[in-house]
Amino acid sequence: MTRAVDWRGLDFRFEYLDIQQLNDRLFAGDFDVAKTSFHAALKLTNETVVLPSGSALGYRVGPLLLAARPDVSPRDQGQVTLCPGEDTTAALLFRVFHPDTSQVRHVVFSDIMPMLQRQEADFGVCIHEGRFTWEQAGLSLVEDLGTRWETETGCPLPLGGIVARRSLPREVISAVQSSIHDSLQFALASRDAPLPSMRRYAQEFDDEVLMQHVDLYVNDWTIELGETGCEALNQLSRRATRAGVIPATSDSIEVFRP
């Protein structure tokens, strides 16, 4: 990477993967620090802590439940809904709000809209840039799962964040947190600086759409979760427990305090 900020003596080696691949590799123990779905983080509370910087959390940022055809809802057991990975927060929200409805299949997030266009499934839970392009794809909106979350909880929706292994020395976790915090501050102050990397790895290559994505998912809570972010994580934990997605005996999610 560009080393535009101080790495504080650390040596970062980066891998860029689909979100469920990141979750799987984290479960396998491959990473010391990783971006992950908060659904996965809930399952790993005994092994990881959430860093206060680097989260995707906000209002009007939630996944969209889309349909291949208009005027349908996922109530028939014979219908198929595509989700972007078993441990994604998008899949968690679908299970919380639409339990025991359609059959769920997990595919890479970027395959969901094309598969709906080919009518290879009835519904799909869409994340990332697809939030801005689903209408051009000729798909129908069933529900904004993020809006439903906000209405029922009053909290911003916590989608994903950066976690670190509890086995790491505290001073190492603190150095990682400081480096991420500084990197975010730099990127927000120099908005064009991240674009080359974004163009390289994004599924959507239009700069305007990419910056819409940034404006939607990067905010004050990305810099620092704060009390509001922590309460949103607690709400997610309670909802997941109530829906039977995580055991009632699971530890509470912990945010690292430098």
Image (cartoon, rainbow, N blue to C red):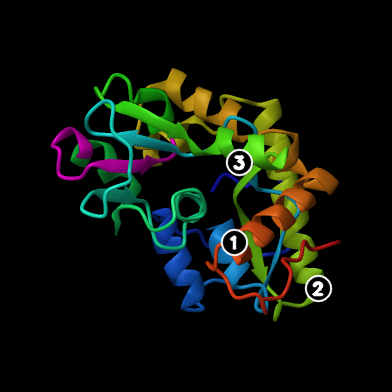
Compare marks 3 and 2 and give the one earlier in the sequence. Answer: 3
Location of mark 1 (residue): 240
Task: Find residue 13 and report its horizontal and vertical position in percent.
Answer: 53, 62
* Residue 19 percent coordinates (x, y): 44, 55
> Are the two marked residues, 3 and 2, in contact with CB atoms closer than 8 angstroms?
no
Which residue does the image show at 73% across and 38% down from the upper left?
A: 154
- How far apart marks 3 and 2 lie (CA) works out to 34 Å
Residue located beneath label 2 in the image: 170
Is residue 104 something one can see in this rendering?
yes
Q: Nearer the viewer, residue 39 or 98?
A: 98
The label on residue 149 is: 3
| Crowd rating for badge 1 (residues with CA inside 10 Å; few <14, some 14–19, many 20+) | many
Q: Amino acid at mark 3?
A: Trp
First in sequence: mark 2 vs mark 1: 2
> Which of the 4 image quarters holds residue 238?
bottom right
Residue 96, how many percent across, how many down? 52, 54
Which residue range is magenta in the image? Answer: 116-128
